[in-house]
Amino acid sequence: MNIIHFSAECYPVAKVGGLADVVGALPKYQNNSDTTSQVIMPFYDIKFTKENTFETVYTSEITLGNSTHTFSILKLKDAVLDFDVFFIDVPELVFKDYVYSFDDTDRFLAFQVAALDWMLTWETYPDIIHCHDHHMGLIPFMLQESFKYEVFRKIPNILTIHNAQYQGWFSHDKVNLIPAFNLDNIGLLDWDGTINPLAAAIKCAWRVTTVSPSYMEELKTSANGLESLLSDESAKCVGILNGIDSSVWNPETDNYLIKNFSNKNLTSGRKANKKYLCDTFNLDFNKPLFAFIGRLVGEKGSDLFPETFKNALDNQNLSILLLGSGNDAVEEQLEALKKDYEGTYNAYIGYDERLSHIIYAGADFLLMPSRVEPCGLNQMYALRYGTIPIVRSIGGLKDTVIDVSEENGFGICHDNVEVSEITTAIHRGIELYTNQPKYKKLSKQIMSIDNSWDASAKQYINLYKSIN
Ligand code: ADP
């Protein structure tokens, strides 16, 4: 079986969030003697593309409305990834020094058209086309409706929704950029009067998956306007929990760590990483260290951080370290807190892959008070590195973390995203930390929870087989 993944992100090439981790891991776990899994993604002007060399395997032109653009298909010269990735370069549109920005409609539309135009030239077509998020949402529509792609109509295609908050909306003024189709079916592109690529993909894809079973259920009542569509289409929808790439996220071999460790020497290993964090960020090693890693957006509950952190730091004995970027006002407030809480609080506002790994290994607790969490990978990384997650029970967090008060529980869960509930959860963490034998036992226990891709990758293969 030949599977092609279409995605805007893929680790380690281009990563903004969890989408990259998924597309960078799933094909690895799908590649075996029966299955070939490849990725097609945009060619951006970013660190990875600057540091690697590429060869051009195809060149042609695409037409978008009245304009024509040249495009090339590139491949890495040396095999630095565990699966094939093809890059589409549309120099005037796609090749920018960012992954996402204001011009995404034109960029991702150009990418999708170039990708399908290139596929028309292949001798054998793929058995499965797997599209990720709204950036690739016009592909299921074009496969079904655009006259020039009629030969692809029988290829089963799947949409995975990694985050339904973002839908790629654009105005009907741009409809002429989409390769010609029967205008009687224009309604397939529309949702509430605008072109909505995510909605179009939900309508046209053969199957729709989300990245956890609970998120699938939640979308029926909260999907940023698409609730009724997802309820109507629920027969073809299924939630498949993401896994983690346990070759990248392995505390025994992770090159980013200050000291590697297994569950046999976790105390000394975790201590070395915590010591580095405390030395670097001027924090007291003897206090429990609570950390947050992620985008500073409403979905992650980050607007509540300044008040919650002040509350906790004023009244409880702990340190807090934050790594993230996003909302300008939240960033400013989190920066400002530094001078008031020197020695107990610090933050790195920005993106730092290496630091994130050391935090997963060295923090005592990882905070995730998310309002929306389709799957959440951070809690799984934390578990793998022996750090206790403190999560709001929603989406994938609900599917992966059991409260310590329950049978076989190991994390700390709260129901609502409110300062008081997060503060109480932090307090429960401090109490747990005070009981060191219990804390260490849990820390060891969670390291051996298997959240790897093995089981989920099989679920995807079974889904492909069911429509092939
Ligand atoms: P989302 O995709 O909603 O941002 P996920 O939990 O699915 O959230 O995935 C987040 C991924 O991005 C994780 O690998 C996390 O470590 C990484 N990440 C997020 N923010 C940062 C940051 N500022 N620095 C380093 N890694 C980050």
Image (spheres, rainbow, N blue to C red):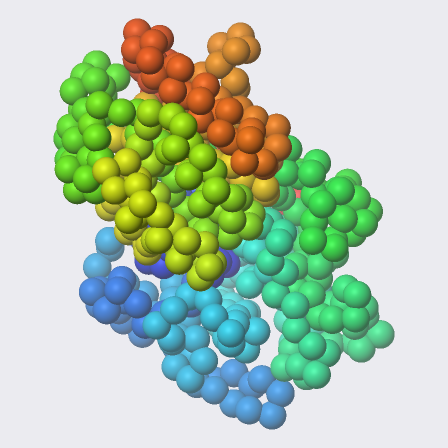
In the drawing, does residue 272 fall left or right of residue 144? left
Residue 108 visible in the snapshot: yes
Give the residue drawn at x 70%, y 36%.
Answer: 217
Q: Is residue 128 above or below residue 268?
A: below
Give the residue drawn at x 35%, y 53%.
Answer: 336
Residue 466 visible in the snapshot: no
In the drawing, does residue 197 fall left or right of residue 249? right
Quadrant holding the C terminus: top right
Question: Where does the image place residue 367, in percent across and percent down from the top left?
Answer: 43, 34
Question: Where does the image place residue 401, in percent across and percent down from the top left?
Answer: 50, 24
Question: Where does the image place residue 78, in percent across and percent down from the top left?
Answer: 21, 59
Q: Where, by quadrant of the figure, is residue 193 drawn?
A: bottom right
Give the residue drawn at x 51%, y 76%.
Answer: 103
387 or 159: which is nearer to us? 387
Question: Where does the image place residue 226, in percent across and percent down from the top left?
Answer: 74, 53
Q: Where, by quadrant of the figure, is residue 84 drawn?
A: bottom left
Q: Is residue 74 above or below residue 389?
A: below
Q: Is residue 218 above or below residue 332?
A: above
459 or 126: which is nearer to us? 459
371 or 332: which is nearer to us? 332
